[in-house]
Image (spheres, rainbow, N blue to C red):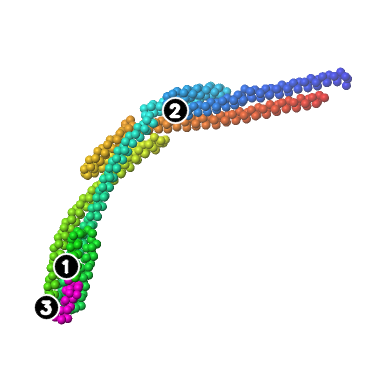
């Protein structure tokens, strides 16, 4: 082959090589340009904008939460302005993102509606709170309940003193009846003993058997000593009567149970009958019978007086039992009323701290029921006090009823605290629901945004991988061509 042919072939090969290298470079750089364009104009800006949207969403959610918690107009003005600004920022960044995705605008109508609804609810809550100062209402009711409690305490103290007095009188009456009854029993025993001794004294002169005489004497002696022992221990009997009776019984005892007593003389007569001794026995028996006959009318009179005293004390005790029952009934009504008063106070105080609508409704119903029971019990107490003619306690009850009605009017009245609490709690629960709805929207947006950021990241990774692949391929082609050229 000639040199010219070789030069021509070499030139042709070099030209072809340059064309191939140029074409490979053009293709490689075109692909690299596409990847760089995707990174710089699509995925990276979208990621940055999505993160910015998340930040603005969270800022608006925080402002929204602060807005729903305000309790006065000044705080509302500040928080409402912050909400409006964060909402405007959110609309702006969301619209920019929508345009990046080829959309005309972002759909934020739900968030705008929640924000506007929240502002309306907060304004209503501020108005409701303004018409009823919670702290002032609580203090006012507490003050009135304090007056009511004081009146109830005074009434309860008076009734308890009355009950103590009637209890003491009842105890004294029962003791007196028991004592009187014991006296009647003792005197009756004394009378029966005197009758038994008199019968024994009349029997001894008629007995014809020494053993029978001794037995009858023993019975009479035992009866006399038993009666004397009873009289000596009977503190409820008249001391003069006791002393006089014991004196006569001891005299009769000697006439029956001494060596010259009735029983001994009768035994002597049975051993050796003697008319003179029989006459002496008759006189002594008559003397003993006379002594006993003297005591019997006295004892009978004392029994009559004791029975009359027992009847009077029984009547008195019945009256005291009636008084005790009445004061116990009054005390029962007063105690129930005091308990209801405490229940009303505790339930009213509890209602200021309730956060659940149904719990508040139930508690207010319980307060209303307690008031109804208080009126009913107060009416029963009034009737009982009138029946007992206790004017001072009636006046005290009247004062208590006035103070309790003041509490009822402020709490349960047409514009009372109970209605205000229900209105405010209903607004608070509505605001809480709005907060939940806002949180759900933010959470949903967060998930969607995270998903889009993640997809953009995947696209970035693909673009970078494509960039590296094209660069490596271009470099490889050039190395191959260069090697062939050499």
The percent coordinates of residue 210 (x first, y second) are 19, 78
Give the magenta-colored segment's residue range.
255-275
Q: In terms of depth relative to the viewer, which is nearer, 262 or 461?
A: 262
The dot on residue 195 is: 1
Q: Is residue 196 visible?
A: no
**How far, Cα to Cα, is label 3 from label 2?**
128 Å
Q: Closest to the observer: 234 or 174?
A: 234
Q: Is residue 355 above or below residue 312?
A: above
Question: In which quadrant of the rendered view does residue 4 lie?
Answer: top right
| Crowdedness near tag 3: few (<14), some (14–19) or many (≥20) residues, C-alpha within 10 Å | few
- Image quadrant where residue 299 sits: bottom left
Q: Is 349 a magenta residue?
A: no
Residue at 57% in and 31% down: 451
Looking at the rendered image, the disc whose residue lies closer to the viewer, 1 or 2, is 1
Q: Which mark lies nearer to you, 3 or 2?
A: 3
Q: What is the tally of numbered marks visible in this picture?
A: 3
The answer to whether residue 243 is left or right of residue 464 is left
Q: Callout 2: helix, strand or loop?
A: loop
- Residue under label 3, please give it: 276
What is the residue that sits farthest to the front in this orientation? Answer: 260
Q: Which residue is mark 2?
A: 70
């Amino acid at each position: 082959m000639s040199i010219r042919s070789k030069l021509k072939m070499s030139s042709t090969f070099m030209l072809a090589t340059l064309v191939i290298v140029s074409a490979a470079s053009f293709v490689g750089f075109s692909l690299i340009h596409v990847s760089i364009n995707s990174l710089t104009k699509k995925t990276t800006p979208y990621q940055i904008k999505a993160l910015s949207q998340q930040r603005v969403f969270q800022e608006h959610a925080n402002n929204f939460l602060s807005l729903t918690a305000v309790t006065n107009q000044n705080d509302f003005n500040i928080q409402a302005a912050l909400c409006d600004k964060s909402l405007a920022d959110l609309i702006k960044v969301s619209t920019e993102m929508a345009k990046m995705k080829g959309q005309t605008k972002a759909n934020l109508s739900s968030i705008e509606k929640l924000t506007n609804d929240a502002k309306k609810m907060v304004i209503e809550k501020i108005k409701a709170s303004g018409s009823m100062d919670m702290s002032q209402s609580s203090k006012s009711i507490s003050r009135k309940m304090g007056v009511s409690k004081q009146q109830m305490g005074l009434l309860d103290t008076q009734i308890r003193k009355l009950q103590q007095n009637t209890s003491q009188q009842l105890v004294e009456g029962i003791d007196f009846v028991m004592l009187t009854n014991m006296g009647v029993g003792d005197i009756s025993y004394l009378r029966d003993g005197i009758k038994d001794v008199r019968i024994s004294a009349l029997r001894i002169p008629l007995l014809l058997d020494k053993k029978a005489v001794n037995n009858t004497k023993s019975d009479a002696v035992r009866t006399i000593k038993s009666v004397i022992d009873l009289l000596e221990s009977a503190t409820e009997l008249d001391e003069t009567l006791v002393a006089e009776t014991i004196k006569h019984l001891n005299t009769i005892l000697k006439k029956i149970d001494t060596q010259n007593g009735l029983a001994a003389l009768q035994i002597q007569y049975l051993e050796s009958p003697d008319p003179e001794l029989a006459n002496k026995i008759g006189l002594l028996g008559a003397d003993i019978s006379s002594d006993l006959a003297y005591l019997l009318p006295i004892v009978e009179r004392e029994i009559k007086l004791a029975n009359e005293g027992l009847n009077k004390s029984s009547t008195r005790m019945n009256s005291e039992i009636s008084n005790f029952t009445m004061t116990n009934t009054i005390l029962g009504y007063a105690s129930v009323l005091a308990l209801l008063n405490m229940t009303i106070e505790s339930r009213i105080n509890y209602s200021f701290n309730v956060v659940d609508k149904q719990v508040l409704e139930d508690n207010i119903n319980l307060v209303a029921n307690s008031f109804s029971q208080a009126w009913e019990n107060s009416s029963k107490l009034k009737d009982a006090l009138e029946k007992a003619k206790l004017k001072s306690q009636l006046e005290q009850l009247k004062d208590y009823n006035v103070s309790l009605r003041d509490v009822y009017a402020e709490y349960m009245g047409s514009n009372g605290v109970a209605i205000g609490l229900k209105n405010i709690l209903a607004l608070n629960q509505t605001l809480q629901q709005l907060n939940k709805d806002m949180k759900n929207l933010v959470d949903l947006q967060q998930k969607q945004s995270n998903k889009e950021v993640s997809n953009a990241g995947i696209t970035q990774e693909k673009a970078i991988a494509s960039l590296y692949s094209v660069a490596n391929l271009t470099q490889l082609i050039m190395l191959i061509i260069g090697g062939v050229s050499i």
